[in-house]
């Protein structure tokens, strides 16, 4: 290797570039996955919308904005959750997970960057779904980008935490992983949690963020118009569940290392 | 972070030359701590009566630049030993040091210098191209991929993957995928590399190429390689030293030559068309016949004929009227040495493996 330069250590910048670039490559190279997800989501929405019209008529028309916002947040949540937990499952199978655990950077920054990439990707597909829903139903919503992205983004960070926890459990008990996918339907309950009647539900993932997103998109409230306490709770729930989920993942992989089940194919 | 790889010197070499280069290098490299130092490593799986000791108080040192083979039946503890060294299995007792860094305490420091190709794992992303994989895993191992781009090109060249560099891995043949897996492990410049069954599932030709590449990489890049395999040809062709494991313990640890030499056989094989049943019966009276192969053409007998007993054999052959077509000493191979030391065939399942079905080797 005499004409070569000396290998230089990679920085966090290089790590971020590598992880995000990989996600980008897979996204653009296999668009069928993303398009498939969008089509399935729109199909469900069509069934919900048309079925609802049939059953509820005018009552549905009055609450259609709320349904569109709720469905938008649900597609975001499902995208973030399943991409993280399925990704961990796949990486276990491929034997690439342990290469990320035994990196000199430590697993946390890699996992966090992967999470960011998944959230960005999910926002792109959910934006398409939102646009189609608005056009198809003729609904008008406030779409102030900073407000919507911040509130929706922080809301689904808590789900990202659940994704890590589910991924960790999958490392230990491979078969349970598939069942954990059913949790996605539980997100519907969280998104429509009665935060006004039962204030304690605000500390559950998604619930408080969902209420804030409704106000932002339906009532046109801007980020800086929210009370500080609401914003603080939104951040606290996001960070709390992300940290908690990561802790579960760490404990699970730690146990997998002691049991010797990490890297069993 | 990662150590820089030592410089390669020119193009393809013959085995003797590479072996000589490796010897020089390993002597020069012995100044620092060894590549791998395992002390009293013990790992049990399960509890109570069901507990299986996968690795039982194993101590082992691998010097820098050497190529060591790990041999053992399934369940002997090879894979557990490797996973402990990588930090993906936490041992119950004992320590593992990689270039002086304790895998348990200073994990991150140790990780920069060690990587592994584990049996049955893809190890890379099939949806990315070969080069994208190399760049990605170099970064994950702590090396700026731009700074090793030339090294990656050379690696792909060596492994005959250069014209597939921009092909997604999923479109490659099995043998090529295996080579990409190896390349992605080497991409980050780890100086200590574990290869668990690297030739498993490869056809004869691909396995031969891979073996040749391993030898060359060890010599030219100054890598320390620990190869675990059932395939004796791979071990004999690639390794300087062999560590044999059985039921979690080391049963032999020596150079390939010494192991073969210690088992030097005194068995002679004689082939002749005259070796019918009656003649063989006559021979049995005079010498110790250990085996008869009537189906061979011409038929053959194997006879214990060490030292002076060789003269008794030639006398017996002459008096029985046997015209010899071929006579040779039977060379023991690693497989026989292995059988003698462990009492099991290398592909067989050992006691621990039988009890602990989930463990791959």
Image (tube, coloured by chain):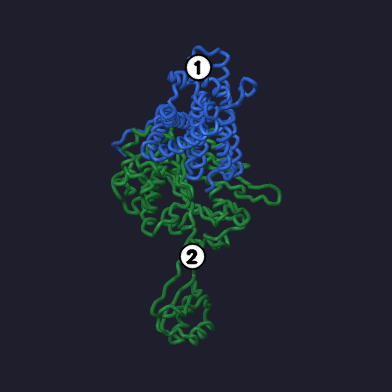
Chain colours: A blue, B green
Q: Residue B262: percent from the left, percent from the top? A: 51, 61
Q: Which residue is mark 2?
A: B264
Q: Residue A84: percent from the left, percent from the top? A: 50, 35
Q: In the rendered structure, find residue A219 and report the number of the disc placed on it.
A: 1
Q: Specify whether residue B95 is in view.
A: yes
Tag 2 secondary structure: loop
Is residue A247 or residue A144 the one in the foreground? A144
Drawn side of residue B265 relative to residue B10, left or right: right
Tag 1 secondary structure: loop
Drawn side of residue B334 relative to residue A261, left or right: left
Q: Residue B186: percent from the left, percent from the top? A: 40, 42
| Residue farthest right in this picture | B48
Other residues around mark 1 within 10 Å, as few (<14) / some (14–19) / many (≥20): few
Mark 2 belongs to which subunit? B
Is residue A3 or residue A50 the one in the foreground? A50
Q: Residue A226: percent from the left, percent from the top? A: 53, 13
Mark 1 belongs to which subunit? A
Q: In the rendered structure, find residue A122 and report the number of the disc placed on it.
A: none
């Amino acid at each position: 290797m005499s004409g070569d330069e000396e290998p230089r250590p990679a920085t966090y910048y290089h790590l971020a570039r590598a992880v995000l670039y990989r996600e980008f490559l897979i996204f653009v190279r296999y668009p069928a996955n993303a398009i498939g997800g969008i089509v399935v989501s729109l199909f469900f929405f069509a069934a919900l919308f048309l079925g609802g019209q049939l059953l509820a008529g005018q009552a549905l028309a009055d609450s259609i904005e709320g349904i569109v916002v709720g469905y938008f947040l649900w597609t975001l949540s499902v995208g973030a959750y399943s991409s993280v937990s399925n990704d961990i499952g796949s990486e276990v199978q491929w034997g690439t997970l342990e290469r990320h655990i035994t990196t000199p950077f430590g697993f946390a920054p890699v996992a966090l960057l992967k999470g960011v990439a998944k959230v960005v990707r999910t926002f792109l597909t959910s934006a398409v779904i939102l646009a189609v829903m608005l056009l198809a139903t003729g609904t008008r919503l406030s779409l102030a980008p900073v407000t919507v992205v911040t509130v929706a983004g922080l809301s689904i960070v808590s789900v990202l935490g659940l994704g890590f926890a589910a991924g960790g459990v999958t490392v230990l008990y491979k078969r349970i992983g598939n069942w954990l996918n059913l949790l996605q339907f539980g997100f519907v309950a969280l998104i429509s949690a009665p935060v006004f009647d039962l204030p304690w539900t605000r500390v559950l993932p998604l619930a408080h963020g969902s209420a804030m997103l409704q106000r932002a998109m339906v009532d046109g409230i801007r980020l800086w118009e929210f009370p500080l306490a609401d914003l603080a709770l939104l951040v606290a729930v996001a960070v709390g569940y992300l940290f908690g989920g990561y802790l579960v993942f760490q404990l699970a992989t730690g146990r997998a290392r002691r049991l010797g089940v990490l890297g069993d194919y | 972070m990662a150590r820089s790889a030592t410089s390669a010197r020119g193009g393809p070499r013959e085995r003797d030359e590479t072996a000589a280069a490796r010897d020089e290098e390993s002597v020069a490299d012995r100044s620092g701590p060894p590549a791998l130092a395992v002390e009293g490593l013990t790992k049990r799986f399960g509890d109570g009566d069901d507990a299986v000791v996968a690795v039982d108080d194993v101590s082992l040192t691998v010097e820098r630049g050497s190529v060591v083979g790990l041999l053992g039946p399934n369940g002997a503890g090879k894979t557990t030993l490797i996973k402990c060294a990588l930090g993906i299995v936490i041992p119950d007792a004992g320590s593992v040091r990689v270039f002086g860094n304790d895998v348990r305490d200073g994990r991150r420091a140790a990780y920069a210098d060690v990587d592994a190709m584990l049996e049955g794992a893809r190890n890379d992303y099939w949806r990315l191209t070969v080069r994208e994989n190399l760049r990605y895993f170099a970064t994950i191992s702590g090396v700026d991929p731009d700074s090793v781009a030339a090294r990656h090109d050379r690696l792909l060249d060596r492994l005959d993957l250069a014209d597939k560099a921009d092909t997604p891995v999923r479109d490659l043949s099995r043998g090529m995928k295996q080579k990409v897996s190896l390349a992605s492990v080497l991409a980050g410049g780890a100086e200590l590399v574990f290869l668990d069954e690297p030739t498993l599932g490869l056809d004869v030709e691909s396995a031969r190429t891979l073996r040749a590449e391993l030898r060359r990489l060890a010599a030219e890049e100054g890598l320390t390689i620990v190869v675990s395999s059932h395939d004796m040809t791979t071990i004999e062709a690639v390794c300087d030293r062999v560590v044999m494991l059985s039921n979690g313990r080391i049963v032999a640890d020596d150079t390939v030559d010494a192991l073969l030499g210690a088992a030097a056989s005194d068995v002679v094989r004689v082939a002749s068309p005259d070796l019918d049943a009656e003649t063989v019966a006559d021979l049995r009276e005079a010498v110790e016949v250990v085996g008869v192969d009537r189906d061979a053409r011409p038929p053959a007998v194997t006879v214990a004929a060490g030292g002076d007993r060789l003269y008794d054999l030639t006398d017996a052959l002459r008096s029985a009227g046997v015209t010899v077509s071929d006579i040779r000493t039977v060379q023991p191979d690693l497989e026989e040495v292995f059988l003698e030391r462990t009492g099991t065939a290398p592909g067989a399942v050992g006691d621990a493996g039988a009890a602990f079905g989930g463990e791959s080797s």
